[in-house]
């Protein structure tokens, strides 16, 4: 199984982003996704900067993919995506059907991101006709769903594309036109002051009983904890997953990459460093066999 570094979900200062990826170029990864996927107002790096960074990272020998926005709200955002698609070298991770349409019109193959909402073999077949080459499973797709996908594809005589699974990071649960960070800080979305840059791993949201509930990240809602499917790597391999996605975090990412690099080649499963992911086990959100131990 190959290791991938998913796109940066948070808003970091430009110098921090460039330093992070300069370091990532030397990590034992096969694929690096870069680009803004959450909010078009985050302009520390613009589209030309991301493409320039992609060229630099490609010198490391890794596959570089340009990731696109998951929620489009303006014509100008389509213009940015057109420039990404027309880069002439790097594949695109499409996180919205508008991006799929633009790729199809230009005959450009693409990778389906986790927000495309592919729930069955027929939807996947249609996207493959449009140029899909790799599917990043949605956050709620578990082991049982994957088994059913394999069975349906086999019955239809359809070869599956490459399959990628999120195995580390806060899960991207939902997107909204409303900015949750601005709301939490009592400022307007159009006058947010880019306050999410003050929260490099998102802003924790708790219940009235002070229990972790969610993480808010601009217009995105994430799981409260970092989810870790490391201990399930054996069954993930047996389920036909080709790539393991690790989402970036502000600290300790080099150690996490090394942890999974060693784990994918080990006979015994690694210890769990984050929270169990209940979705993989067909359970609700962050839960699983060792949830109680995690919360204690």
Image (cartoon, rainbow, N blue to C red):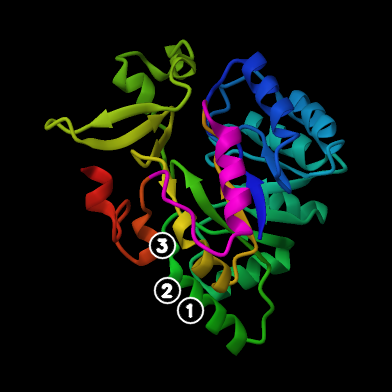
Magenta stretch: residue 266 in it?
A: yes
| Among numbered discs 1 and 3, the one appearing first in the sequence | 1
The numbered disc on residue 144 is 2
Q: Is residue 94 left or right of residue 282?
A: right
Q: Secondary structure at mark 2?
A: helix
Q: Position of residue 36 (x, y in %)?
A: 61, 32
Which is in the foreground here, disc 1 or disc 3? 3
Q: Position of residue 63 (x, y in %)?
A: 78, 46
Residue at 70% x, 32% y: name it: 80
Residue hosting label 3: 280
User: Which quarter of the rendering shows the N terminus?
Assistant: bottom right
Q: Are marks 1 and 3 in contact (CB under 8 Å)?
A: no
In this view of the protein, which residue sits in the foreground, 229 or 273? 273
In this view of the protein, which residue sits in the foreground, 12 or 2? 2
Residue neighbourhood size for the residue with mark 1, other residues' Cα within 10 Å, grouped as few (<14), some (14–19), many (≥20): few
The numbered disc on residue 165 is none
Q: Which residues are magenta?
A: 251-274
Residue hosting label 1: 148
Q: CA distance from mark 1 to mark 3?
A: 13 Å
Q: Is residue 177 above or below residue 294?
A: above
Q: Are marks 2 and 3 in contact (CB under 8 Å)?
A: no
User: Which quarter of the rendering shows the C terminus?
Assistant: top left
Residue at 59% x, 54% y: name it: 244
Residue at 43% x, 51% y: name it: 271
């Amino acid at each position: 199984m190959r290791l991938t570094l998913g796109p940066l979900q948070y808003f970091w200062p430009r110098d921090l982003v460039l330093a992070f990826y300069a370091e990532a170029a030397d990590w034992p990864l096969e694929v690096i996704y870069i680009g803004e996927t959450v909010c078009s107002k985050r302009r520390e790096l613009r589209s030309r900067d991301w493409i320039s960074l992609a060229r630099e990272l490609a010198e490391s020998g890794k596959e570089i993919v340009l990731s696109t926005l998951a929620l489009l709200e303006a014509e100008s955002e389509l213009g940015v995506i057109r420039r990404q698609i027309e880069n002439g070298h790097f594949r695109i991770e499409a996180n919205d059907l508008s991006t799929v349409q633009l790729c199809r019109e230009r005959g450009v193959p693409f990778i389906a991101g986790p927000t495309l909402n592919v729930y069955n073999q027929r939807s996947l077949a249609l996207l493959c006709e449009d140029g899909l080459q790799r599917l990043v499973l949605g956050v709620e797709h578990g082991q049982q769903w994957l088994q059913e996908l394999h069975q349906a594809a086999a019955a239809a005589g359809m070869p599956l594309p490459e399959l990628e699974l999120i195995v580390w990071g806060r899960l991207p649960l939902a997107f909204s036109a409303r900015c949750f960070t601005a709301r939490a800080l009592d400022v307007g979305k159009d006058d947010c002051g880019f306050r999410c840059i003050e929260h490099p791993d998102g802003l924790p949201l708790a219940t009235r009983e002070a229990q972790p509930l969610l993480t808010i990240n601009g217009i995105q809602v994430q799981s409260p904890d970092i989810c870790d499917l490391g201990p399930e790597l054996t069954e993930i391999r047996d389920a036909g997953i080709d790539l393991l996605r690790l989402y970036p975090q502000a600290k300790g990412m080099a150690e996490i990459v090394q942890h999974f690099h060693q784990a994918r080649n080990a006979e015994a499963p690694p210890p769990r460093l984050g929270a169990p992911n209940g979705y993989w086990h067909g359970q609700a959100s962050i839960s699983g066999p060792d949830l109680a131990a995690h919360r204690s």
